[in-house]
Structures are given as structure tokens and as C-alpha cells.
Image: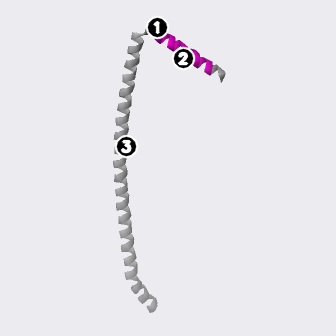
């Protein structure tokens, strides 16, 4: 029993080192996870800002197109009606083929 008791005393420093290393690894992993989270949040914010900018640009272009189309219809109402009728007929013919 004395041999077993002395063996556990010599193993004690090894266990303490193992616990210390494990604690260090745990801290490092937590730090890496926190860093990765921060980087991901920054990238997400960058993408969100870019997408918001693209959305605004697209909306502005759509508004310009709408105003341009309205002006053309006001300038040439008869040809606009004929074009709309022709497109409607063409779409109807394509729809009926399916």
C-alpha cells in the first residue's frame, strides 16, 4: 500500500500539469471562438451594408425606369396601346401553346 501511496504522490504533479494544459487549451479555444465570432459579425455587417446599398441603387433605377415609361406613354399614347396589345396577344399565344 505504501508503494501505491508514493506512486499517487509522484503522479500528482503530472495530473496538475495535465489540468493546467487542459485549462490553457480551453482558454485558447474560447479566445479563438470569440475572435471568429467577431470576424463573422464584421463580415456580416459589411455584406448587409453592401446589400442595402445595392437595394437602394436598384430601387432608384426602377423608379427612373417607371418615370421614363410613364413619360413615353404620355408622349405616344396610341403606339403605347398598340405595343401593349401586341405583347398581350403574343404572351397569350405562348401561354396557350403550353
Counting from the top left corner in percent of width and height, residue 75 is at 39, 10
Q: Is residue 66 above or below residue 50?
A: above
Closer to the camera, 84 or 51?
A: 84
N-terminal-most mark, 2 or 3: 3
Q: Residue at x 36, y 23 (%)?
A: 64
- Residue 87 badge: 2
Provide the major secondary structure of the magenta segment: helix
Disc 2 crowd rating (10 Å Cα; few below 14, some 14-19, many 20+) is few
Closer to the camera, 64 or 14?
A: 64
Mark 2 falls on what kind of element? helix
Residue position marked by numbered label 1 in the rendering: 78
Residue position marked by numbered label 3 in the rendering: 47
Q: Is residue 28 above or below residue 72?
A: below
Magenta segment boundaries in residue numbering: 77-94
Q: Quadrant of residue 72?
A: top left
Q: Quadrant of residue 33?
A: bottom left
Q: Residue at x 42, y 10 (%)?
A: 76
Counting from the top left corner in percent of width and height, residue 57 is at 35, 31
Amino acid at each position: 500500500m505504501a508503494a501505491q501511496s508514493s506512486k499517487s504522490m509522484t503522479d500528482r504533479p503530472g495530473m496538475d500539469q495535465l489540468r493546467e494544459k487542459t485549462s490553457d487549451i480551453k482558454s485558447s479555444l474560447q479566445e479563438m471562438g470569440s475572435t471568429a465570432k467577431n470576424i463573422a459579425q464584421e463580415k456580416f455587417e459589411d455584406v448587409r451594408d453592401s446589400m442595402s446599398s445595392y437595394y437602394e441603387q436598384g430601387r432608384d433605377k426602377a423608379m427612373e425606369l417607371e418615370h421614363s415609361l410613364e413619360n413615353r406613354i404620355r408622349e405616344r399614347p396610341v403606339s403605347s396601346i398598340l405595343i401593349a396589345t401586341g405583347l398581350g396577344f403574343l404572351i397569350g399565344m405562348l401561354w396557350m401553346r403550353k
